[in-house]
Each structure stands twice: as C-alpha cells, then as structure tokens.
Amino acid sequence: MKLLHTADWHLNDRLGRIDRTDDLRAAVERIAKICKDEKVDVLIVAGDLFSELARPDALRETIYHWQQVFSDFLGSGGTILTLTGNHDNENFCQTLRHAMSLAAPNITKIGDRVPPGRLYLAAEPTLLKVADRTGNFDVKFVLMPYPTPTRYLRGEAGQKYTSPGEKHRLLNTAFAEALDGLRRHTEFQGTGPSVLSAHVHVQGSQFGTSPFRMTADEDVILAADAWAAQFDYVALGHIHKPQFIGREHVRYSGSIEKMDLGERNDVKGVLLFELGPKGLVGEVKVLPLPSSPIYEVNVFDPPNDLPRLKAEFPDAQQDLVNLHIIYTAGRDHLEELLRELDAIFPRWYARDWKETGRVGPTLTIGEADRTRSFTETVNDYLSQELMGRSEEEREELLRLAKELIDQMPAT
C-alpha cells in the first residue's frame, strides 16, 4: 500500500490583507497530481484542513474544489483519511462529517474496514482499517484529532479546571488514555501494519517563532517516546516545520505552503511511504512542493532604497512581503512612496511607517513657531500623520478636530 502524508492545509486562510485561497488550492492540485503520478492508495491529511478565518461561502467553494481535484483519485479507489486540528471549526467539521455519512455508510464500529474511494473525517479518536488493493492485508489507522476539552474531556467534572496548566494536564492524560484504549481494542490486535495520525505538539519538535497562531503556553505538549515502537508509521500534523522526531518513521510533514514569516526558510513538501504486511517497506521519500516566497523589506532611505528595490526585485509580483518604512516629512511624499512600493510588491500583506521629522529647523519645547495659530499647528500635524488614510477619513478626522478646538475655552 502506498501512502502520502500531508498536513496543515489551512484552506481559505488569510495573511494580513492577502487571501491565500489561490496559493493553497494550487498546492492541493499539486498533491492530487502526486497521488496520480505515484499511484497512491491512501492520502493522509493530519489535521487543519480549513482555516478558522474561512467564511461559510468560501468553505462551500473549497469543498467543491476538492470534489473536482480528487474525483479521479477517489473514483479509482483511492482513500482520503483526515482528522480535525486546532484551527478546524469543530461545529463545521461535525456537520460535514454527518452530511458525509448520509451519502456513504458511516463507520459503525471501532476498527471497521471502510470502503475505499471515499473521504473519511475523524472528529474524535478513531480506529479504522483500509484493505490493501490486492486484498492480502489490512492497514490499521488510529486517527487522533487535536486535544481540546470538547473532544477529549468527558462529563461535566472532566471539563472543570481552574487554570490553563490543569487543563493541559487533563488533556494530556485524556489523550494518552484514548490512544491506549484504541491500541488495546481487539480490532487493533493481531498482525498487520498500523499507522497513527495525530494533530499534536510533540516534545522535542522544532518550529519557527512559535506554533502557528498559538503561543507555546496555549498549546498541549505530548510525549511521543513510545510511538515509534507502537506503530509502523506516525503521521503528525500541527507543527509546520518538516522534521522527524527520534526515529525517521515518526514525522511531521509540515504545512503545504508557507503560512507566515516564521516559515520563510522552510522547504515545503509531502511524504511518500509504502507499507507491506510486515510494516514499512523501504525509506520514506520527501517530495518537495513549491511555495510562495515570504520576507520583510525595510525602507530607511526612500530616495536611494526605491531604485535599489526595483532592481533587486523585478519579479516580486507573487511574493508575500511585510514592509517597514521610515520617511522624512517635507522630503518624502508618503502617499507616492506607498504607491511605488505597491507596484514593486503588489502582494504586501502588512506594512507600517514612521516619520523621522521635518527637514529644516527643529521645533523644541518653548520655541514654537509664533506665527502659526494653535489650530494651524494641529491641522498641520494631523495632515502629516493621516497621509496614509483615505481622503474621506482625513476630512472626517480633521472635521472632528476642528469641532474639539472650537469647543475649547478662549485663552
């Protein structure tokens, strides 16, 4: 059986002002082509299929895109196994899972052999089997979604905790008990290869600045020392940096695109492996995926930096860029500067700017320009500070400032 390990698709995500839908759909299409070219039997998506930023209409369009992209794969008997991650909307995923069960038989018992040619979404700890295409053996799959209280802490008492630390301890224990329970189940016993797929933060894993849109304090960190001996392959999701943990068959595939600046140096890809009746056959193969360049650009001296940037980045139309701008009022025209940078980096996703002061004599406390009125000084200051705003916003804020000044008592 040939299997492809992927994770962290984050479909319909955004980075700042940029909609990542097209980038992510292109990556999904590349994965579908790999499934065809490599004659993959089972595609694993180890959590975070969707972005928490996705709108309902966008989710519908994404599912329709899936149908188009993977119709040949599913039609030829391929199987997609997925599970929910920390960024997947639990209500939406449960609704999707129930809707899918109306169109196809649901998993009725723990350890059932499921029909091929379908997509299965695990929103709770799940054990199922998929038969090899030859019918000679079954592969046992344990699917473990991200540990949240609603997924793992049963009963009212189990969801009462007094601190984040206590919640993490309860979830850690509940995850271990759920996994151990599935491994001890009679349907897991006996011969045949087994795969664990989990969306979790494993001790010893490495990531960029922090887990994607989550601080280390918020995350549940699990020990995975025993997993290498318990399963023939461990397909992990959640940490976006590709890596193996301890043993080469315990792996994070990483995300399918660079999702933020912390992943700027990551080499994205998917993992192809093969299972036989006695376990892993050969080595795990890394198949690279193209990804969008993402970086920061500092503009400290606009008259000199702009020509240099035009020469250095002639083909940056698809790059994701965070702009940091320092300009001098009276010398640099901020709106024109922003327009020129927008032409060089049309997919900037965030930008900030700081004014370093006017060219000419500096005004200090006690030495204000006596020829200008208070109102003129305030209007001049606001006009400079609001240069990046729209004309309507500037006019409204200046109007409000005038109203406040008019209400001040005369001195």
Image (tube, helix red, strand yellow):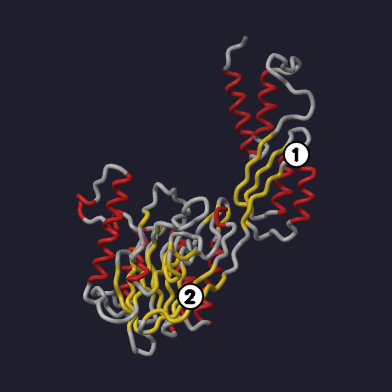
- Which numbered disc flags the more N-terminal residue, 2 or 1? 2
Residue pictured at 47% horizontal, 51% vertical: 213
Q: Secondary structure at mark 2?
A: strand
Figure quadrant of residue 327? top right
Q: Is residue 240 left or right of residue 222?
A: right
Q: Which residue is mark 1?
A: 333
Bin the neighbour count of mark 1 within 10 Å (Cα to Cα): few under 14, some 14-19, many 20 and up. some
Which percent across, then down, holds residue 124? 30, 64
Dots 2 and 1: beta carbons under 8 Å?
A: no
Mark number for residue 286? none
Q: Nearer the viewer, mark 2 or mark 1?
A: 2
Q: Secondary structure at mark 1?
A: loop
Q: Which residue is mark 2?
A: 284
Residue pictured at 34% horizontal, 89% vertical: 136
Q: Is residue 172 left or right of residue 342?
A: left
Q: Which quadrant does the N terminus fall into?
A: bottom left
